[in-house]
Amino acid sequence: MVTLMKQIQQFMLKYIRENAALIANSLNNFLPFQKKFYSDDCVIGNRRAEKLREFLGMTEHILSISQSADQATVITRCADKSGPLMRMKYGLVLVKASWFIKNIELECTACKGAPGNYGCPLCKGNGWHNLARQKHVAPRPIIPPLPPFSRF
Ligand SMILES: [Zn+2]
């Protein structure tokens, strides 16, 4: 008999593993696409590949799991070759005996996930940034404006 906590851990380990494989596949698919459509010195093409390599170079480890009835919270930490990065908080729900991710929050870089700092201009005291309401999260990547579209 597998406990609920073990089920959640297995679900998250599978998610982390398959998410990394998905990113690796995306990069493998992107490279021939980049060669086909972007010049070697195209900033946009290089930036897209760089972003995928950056995600691919990250690892994610489970720090804690808490569970009550049909919901669970899993906190993980991401790291890259330079060391630990931010923590992530996953909100999970149990639907028909299967776990699903319902929500993901990122640790506030200023408050480090500690709530109550209502003066924080980034999270307003929440300690975390909800990716579903992504207004104050990390700045969006800077992409130069697109040239005017031609008419065909
Ligand atoms: Zn904050």
Image (spheres, rainbow, N blue to C red):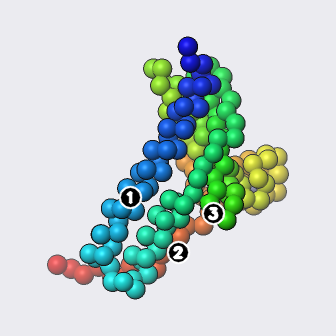
**Does the beta carbon of the residue at mark 1 sit less than 8 Å from ligand 1?**
no
**Does the beta carbon of the residue at mark 2 sit less than 8 Å from ligand 1?**
no
Of labels 2 and 1, earlier in sequence is: 1
Front label number (2 vs 1): 1
Residue 33 against residue 70 in the figure, above or below: below
Label 3 to label 1: alpha-carbon separation: 20 Å
Task: Locate the C terminus by quadrant.
Answer: bottom left
Write the residue at 68% across / 58% down: 85
Front label number (3 vs 2): 3
Q: Which residue is mark 3?
A: 81
Position in image of residue 56 (x %, y %): 50, 59
Label 3 to label 2: alpha-carbon separation: 23 Å
What kind of residue is marked 3?
Answer: Lys
Quarter occupied by residue 10: top right
Q: Are marks 3 and 1 in contact (CB under 8 Å)?
A: no
The tag on residue 26 is 1
Position in image of residue 37 (x %, y %): 28, 76
Write the residue at 73% across / 59% down: 109
Front label number (3 vs 1): 3
Q: Residues within 10 Å of mark 2 (few under 14, many from 20)?
A: few
Of labels 3 and 2, earlier in sequence is: 3
Quarter occupied by residue 67: top right
Q: Residues within 10 Å of mark 3 (few under 14, many from 20)?
A: few
Secondary structure state at the residue bearing disc 2: loop
Q: Which residue is mark 2?
A: 142
Label 2 to label 1: alpha-carbon separation: 21 Å
